[in-house]
Image: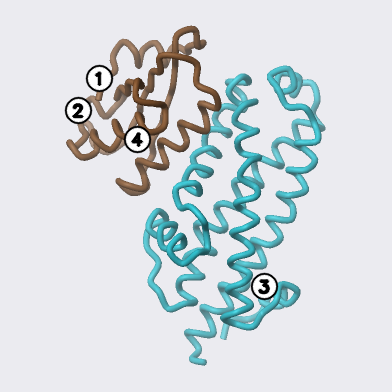
Chain colours: A brown, B cyan
């Protein structure tokens, strides 16, 4: 995984501050590959229940991370039980690593 | 005033005039768009209703353009006009918050992220798009207040009121 401990903690804390203390955040995509360089930070946040205004909350989470780590490209997907999922969501759930 | 100082002043005021115009057209699109009931059905009808789709696209595009102008141009130029050295966007937003030009740097960064989501979701995800477009509409007040702060800077620091800004847009740099 190509994230420093500080980056992992910042992302984890931002997820819990925005999506709530029971949220689980996974890293997926190219940052899991130690042989690649740079690239977007792809995240999936799982919540135990429906999240109102989830797009705004995901945008706020990304903003919180960037205020700490500087501007970078962060893609945040979200899901909860019963939320429609795309193939990308399913693959992120399958392959993503919990932070 | 030295020529460099005059140049940074003119660039700031010219960019403020651009922001003024962009905010005016954004407010127009905002009012027009949110006079409609925006829900999932509305989003799904857009493929058959080109006129409404254009209204929506105008709003999304203007929502992004105003943020780009303020974040990438006006803010660094305002700092330079105060003889400060601008840095990366996030640092500039934090500095702007300290100076009272924007109320909340993180909220600005959030609006920017939301804009990126809107562009992506428009064609692919009507459910999420319908919710997020409302959230975007909620940022207009923040944009308006921030423009007012930059305008106050122009007035107080350089003695230039809003109605004189346009004179700087095409003024040759010293």
Q: Position of residue B163 (x, y in %)?
A: 75, 74
Q: Which residue is mark 3?
A: B169
Q: Check disc 1 and report the residue beneath it.
A: A97
Q: Nearer the viewer, mark 4 or mark 2?
A: 4
Q: CA distance from mark 4 to mark 2?
A: 19 Å
Disc 1 or 4, which lies upstream in sequence? 4
Q: CA distance from mark 4 to mark 3?
A: 41 Å
Mark 1–mark 2 distance (CA, rounded to whole Å): 9 Å
Give the residue number, with chain letter if any, for mark 4.
Answer: A14
Nearer the observer: mark 4 or 3; the answer is: 4
What is the C-alpha distance between the residues marked 1 and 3? 51 Å
Residue in the foreground of this view, choosing between B122 and B144 = B144
- The answer to whether the residue labelled 1 contacts the one labelled 2, judged by CB atoms less than 8 Å apart, is yes
Callout 3: residue from which chain? B
The answer to whether marks 4 and 2 mark residues whose Cβ atoms lie closer than 8 Å is: no
The image shows residue B100 at horizontal and vertical percentages of 50, 64
Q: Secondary structure at mark 4?
A: helix
Is A10 above or below relative to B4?
A: above
Q: Nearer the viewer, mark 1 or mark 2?
A: 1
């Amino acid at each position: 995984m190509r994230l420093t401990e500080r980056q992992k903690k910042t992302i984890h804390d931002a997820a819990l501050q925005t999506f709530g203390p029971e949220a689980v955040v996974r890293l997926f995509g190219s940052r899991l590959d130690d042989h690649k360089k740079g690239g977007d930070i792809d995240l999936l946040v799982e919540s135990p229940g429906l999240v109102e205004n989830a797009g705004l909350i995901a945008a706020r989470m990304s903003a919180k991370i960037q205020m700490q780590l500087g501007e970078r490209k962060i893609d945040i997907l979200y899901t909860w039980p019963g939320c429609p999922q795309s193939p990308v969501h399913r693959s992120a759930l399958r392959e993503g690593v919990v932070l | 005033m030295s020529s460099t100082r005059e140049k940074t002043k003119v660039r700031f005021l010219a960019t403020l005039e651009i922001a003024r115009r962009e905010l005016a057209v954004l407010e127009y699109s905002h009012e027009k768009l949110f006079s409609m009931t925006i829900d999932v059905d509305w989003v799904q009808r857009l493929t058959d209703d080109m006129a409404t789709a254009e209204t929506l696209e105008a709003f999304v595009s203007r929502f992004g353009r105003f943020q780009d102008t303020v974040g990438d141009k006006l803010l660094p130029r305002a700092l330079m006009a105060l003889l400060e050295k601008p840095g990366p966007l996030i640092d500039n937003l934090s500095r702007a918050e300290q100076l009272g030009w924007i109320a909340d740097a993180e909220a600005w960064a959030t609006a920017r992220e939301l804009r990126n989501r809107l562009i992506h979701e428009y064609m692919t995800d009507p459910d999420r798009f319908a919710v997020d477009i409302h959230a975007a509409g909620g940022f207009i007040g923040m944009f308006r207040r921030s423009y007012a702060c930059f305008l106050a800077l122009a007035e107080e620091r350089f003695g230039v009121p809003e109605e004189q800004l346009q004179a700087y847009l095409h003024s040759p740099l010293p």
